[in-house]
Amino acid sequence: MTHRGVFVTGTDTGVGKTVVACQLVRQLRARGIETAVIKPIETGVGVDGPADAIALREAAGDRDPIEDVCPQQFELPVAPSVAAASAGRRVDRSAIRSAYERVCGGSDFVVAEGAGGLLVPIDEQFDMLDLALELSLPALLVARAALGTINHTRLSLEVAEQRGLDVVGVVISHADGVLSAADAANLGALRSLLGDRLLGEIPPRGHTGAKQPEAGGSSPGSPIDLDALLRRTDDLRASG
Ligand SMILES: Nc1ncnc2c1ncn2[C@@H]1O[C@H](COP(=O)(O)OP(=O)(O)OP(=O)(O)O)[C@@H](O)[C@H]1O
Ligand SMILES: [Mg+2]
């Protein structure tokens, strides 16, 4: 059975996937849409538990046990295949699959957060892009605002297309603070390139968003264009 939702991936690690995923969850819930969350694999998990999964679960209103929200946890803060090997384990994909079915039960929408970017290895044969395909979720790509983002974003979109992963759109997160004039011009080029695939921008924290051009339909209070995201998600489900 397929579920309505998105797989939040990024052009890199640390680009703002968790920030965007939590924002999306809050906007969905504000719309009255019952939302499940899952972080299938989290690495760098210390004594305080899986930080991303805890943040997602809190945004979703603490619905499910943390072991289901994050079924595969590893201590080393590296790619899943490497973190698992260092613990003498392999990523258990069937545990992900069953946790996914449990968290999705009774919800209208699921927000999954990947680890790293699309080509991060999960084992010798399987990477994060394969996981999005296995869960039958289209990707929501998070891009950083900083220099290098045009290349990273195009690479991610091209590989998704080549391998048959639908992408509902892109959200830019200003994880690196307020941009220099040069970086702002560079980001303007990315916005133009994306056109209506740009579904929103998360301004730098503490910033009202007034100086950051908004994607169509979004506003500083609700940075992601939820109508467009839901429309595209539903269109892809109908055509898939
Ligand atoms: N718009 C923003 N404004 C300010 N800080 C941000 C913004 N987006 C992200 N950050 C910060 O950047 C860092 C990385 O963000 P986040 O944890 O969401 O990235 P990620 O892609 O989920 O990383 P990971 O690959 O570890 O899962 C965090 O400290 C986060 O608080
Ligand atoms: Mg994260």
Image: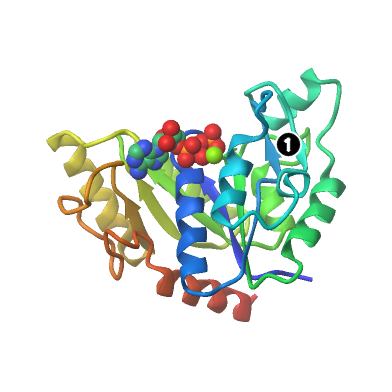
Q: Foreground: 90 or 99?
A: 99
Q: Does the image show residue 118?
A: no
Q: Where on the image, by quarter, is ligand 2?
A: top right
Picture quarter containing residue 152? top left
**Residue 102 in the figure: left or right of residue 114:** right
Residue at image x 40%, y 54%?
Answer: 171
Farthest-out residue, top: 86
Name the amino acid, label 1: Ile
User: Coloured how?
Assistant: rainbow
Farthest-out residue, bottom: 238
Picture quarter containing residue 43? top right
Residue 143 percent across, percent down from the top left: 40, 45
Residue at image x 63%, y 43%?
Answer: 53
Split into 4 quadrants, where in the image is the N terminus? bottom right
Residue 181 percent across, percent down from the top left: 13, 37
Picture quarter containing residue 89? top right
* Callout 1 crowding tier (Cα within 10 Å): few <14, some 14–19, many ≥20: many
Q: State the residue position of label 1.
A: 122
**Residue 229 in the figure: left or right of residue 188:** right
Residue 111 percent across, percent down from the top left: 60, 58
Count the labels in the image.
1
Residue at image x 54%, y 48%?
Answer: 9
**Residue 208 in the figure: left or right of residue 38:** left
Split into 4 quadrants, where in the image is the C terminus? bottom right
Q: Does the image show residue 9?
A: yes
Residue 186 percent across, percent down from the top left: 22, 41
| Label 1 residue SS | loop
Residue at image x 45%, y 64%?
Answer: 27
**Residue 119 in the figure: left or right of residue 203:** right
